[in-house]
Image (tube, rainbow, N blue to C red):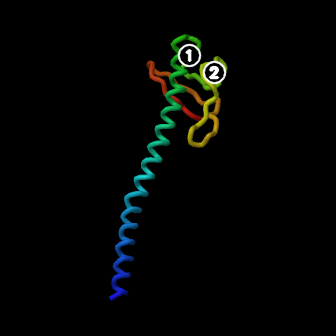
Amino acid sequence: MVMVMNTNKIIIMGSIIAIILIIGIPTTYKVVKNHQSNLLRSVEAKIINAAKKCYFEEKCTNDKIYLKELYDLKYLDKMSNPITKEFYNEDSFIEVKDNTFSFISI
C-alpha cells in the first residue's frame, strides 16, 4: 500500500512538471523572440528618424544615406545592434524610395 502511494505521488509530480515544461518553454521562447524583435525595431526606428531629419533638412540628398554620413553630420551617435552588442557597419544605409525609408544593415 505504501509503495502504491509513493508511485502515485511520483506520477502526479512528474505530470505536473511535464505540463509546466510543455507550456513554459514555448512561452518563454516566444517572449524572448518578441522582446528581441522589439529591440531591433526600436533601434532601426531611431536610425530611420535620423535619416529622415537629415533628408528633409536637405543635408543628405542621395537615395542611400549611409550611417557614416549620419555620424559625420552628428545626426546620430554610433549605433549598435541591441542583441549582439556589435556596432553597425558604417556602410549600412537607409534607402529612400518615394519618401519611404528602409534600413539595410551590412
- Residue 92 is left or right of residue 21, and the answer is right
Q: Is residue 93 above or below residue 73?
A: below
Q: Name the residue type under label 1.
A: Cys
The residue nearer to you, when weighing 98 against 33, is 33
Q: Is residue 11 above or below residue 63?
A: below
Q: Residue at x 58, y 37 (%)?
A: 81
Taking the view exactly as shown, the residue that stands out farthest to the right is 72
Q: Residue 100 sits in which quadrant?
A: top left
The spot of residue 49 in percent (x, y) is 51, 22
The reply to whether discs 1 and 2 touch (Cβ–Cβ < 8 Å) is yes
Q: Is residue 22 above or below residue 29?
A: below
Q: Residues within 10 Å of mark 1 (few under 14, many from 20)?
A: many
Q: Secondary structure at mark 2?
A: helix
Q: Which mark is residue 54?
A: 1
The spot of residue 37 in percent (x, y) is 47, 40
| Quadrant of the image containing the C terminus | top right
Q: Which mark is residue 33?
A: none
Q: Which residue is mark 2?
A: 69
Q: Residue at x 49, y 42 (%)?
A: 36
Q: Is residue 77 above or below residue 33?
A: above
The residue nearer to you, when weighing 61 against 13, is 13
Q: Name the residue type under label 2.
A: Glu
